[in-house]
Image: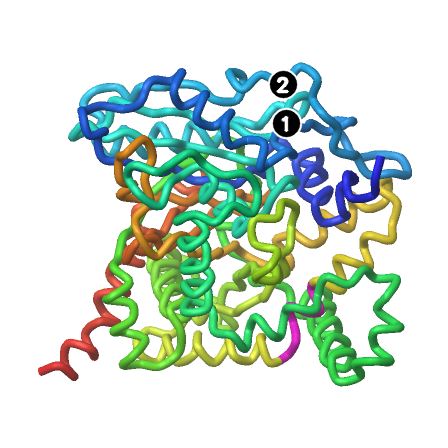
Amino acid sequence: MSAHDQLTALDATFLELEQADDSALMHIGGVLVFDPLPDGGAPPLAALRAHITERLDRLPRYRQRLDAPRTSGLAWPSWVDDEHFDVAAHVRHATLPAPGDEGDFLEWTADFYSHRLDRARPLWEIVLLDGMADGRWALAWKTHHCLVDGVGSVGVVDLLLDAEPAPGVPPGPGGDTELAVAAAERVRHVRLLHPPESVRQTAATGLVAARVGAHAVMHPREALQRSRGVIDLLVRDELIAAPRCTLNVPIGATRRFATVHVTLEDLNAIRGELGGTINDVVLCAVTAGLRELLLARGEELPRQGLRAMVPVNIRRDSGRGDLGNRVSSLFVDLPVSEADPVRRYALVRAAVRRQKASGQALAAAAVTALGGLAPPVLHATFARSLFAKRLFNLTITNVPASPRPLYAFGAPMVDVVPMVPLAAEHGVGVAVVSYAGTLTFGLCADRATVPDLDVLRDGIAASLRELAAPVAAAVR
């Protein structure tokens, strides 16, 4: 068995988080919504299973399971072929109750993501969902975070979808098709949403801890940047903890879901008028929504802000579509105490620039790599510390999908609803995905402790309208 088949320390972290707390569900995913097929309705389940089986050879790990369901002892679990693999166990059918409106859809979505994947089988699942209003249907999928990160999971979706309504026979690995062109476009889309300087800052973070010293000799500037970032992370964890709030209390395993939709054209207009990036606009809108949520709960607004963990993709362009986790993190303080929307945007933008310049993403990857030197029996404690409420209040992840329409069975995909997993004592998470000119916020929350998720949703939508006001004024 090759070392490539063994989980990395970061991959194993997501298994350990589940083992430590029943409320932690460490799968990622999303719901892909389609218009009716050309002849109406949704595809037959048998056709979907055949469609996935035909393309699954390009994702061999999706036919593999863990050789041990838990991390323990002195070695990480490894991926092994599942001799009993049956696509029918992973691809199933469900129907929304009438009338199949948005409320019914979000309730079903919340329930779907409230159940763990079976560790005795390959760690993924897809559901063909029909019964939606206007004859629409959906593909809901979840994949365990130990198998793939958010950006990689979108790459998987690329393989399952088509770049045109009536594609030819899908090629094997490396085939030259319209889908390859779409993938190249999505790389450009990534660069639009996440400027190149951030990619350059994080591209070298895949080194294992054993090579850090030698690498430092050859790259002293990066080593200094990494060291400062590690110190910053440790100071944050030990001396400047994330503020206490009612979003960070013991939670259950049952989820609640909400969405906000906005056009990329509107976000680009805001970015063009106020400066910064689309990701700055996203973080500012979430900041405003969190402010409204805390105010509605009668909580004091922390002056230092709520701290968000913002995953950063460190996968090189050539590695897009690879499985496993290629991700690090920035920790950004969101100025929820600032009432003025334009001033709040400037503070968010400055905070993001400051953390990127500090080399914090490099540091987070280095700390994770150092933790990988610990044997699995000790690593679990380290894993929990990386996702503790003391370090951050919530996760906000922004993943670009395709910039142009995609299809399945000839039907156009009209929406993507993303989700982000909740670690223990983290009541809310925000996943954002951009697709074909639209950006969707997927708000995932603990059902018991966040009954007021609509306040966060409405606050995000209101913030986007507030930020658009200076743009409208400039046009006039």
Measure the alpha-carbon separation of dots 2 and 1: 6 Å
| Residue sitting at x 42%, y 34% | 169
Q: Is residue 145 left or right of residue 394?
A: right
Residue 172: x, y in percent? 54, 38
Magenta extent = 358-364
Look at label 2 and name its amino acid. Answer: Phe
The quarter in which the N terminus is drawn is top right
Q: Label 1, on which residue?
A: 63
Give whichever of 431, 293 is nearer the camera.
431
Residue at 28 percent of width and 36 percent of height: 34
2 or 1: tag closer to the N-terminus: 1
Note whether 194 is above or below 414 in the view shown.
below
Q: Which residue is mark 2?
A: 85
Q: Secondary structure at mark 2?
A: loop
Q: Is residue 32 above or below residue 184?
A: above
Asked if disc 2 and disc 1 are in contact, CB closer than 8 Å, the reply is: yes
- Residue 151, image x and y in percent? 52, 52
Binning the other alpha carbons within 10 Å of mark 1 as few (below 14), some (14 to 19) or many (20 upward) gives many
Residue 179 included in the magenta stretch of the image: no
Rendered residue at 43%/26% (across/down):
51
Towards the viewer: 53 or 92: 53
Q: Amino acid at mark 1?
A: Arg
Q: As displayed, is residue 65 above or below residue 376?
A: above
Q: Quadrant of residue 17?
A: top right
Magenta: main secondary structure equals helix
**Taking 259 as reference, is 360 left or right?**
right
The percent coordinates of residue 109 (x first, y second) are 38, 32
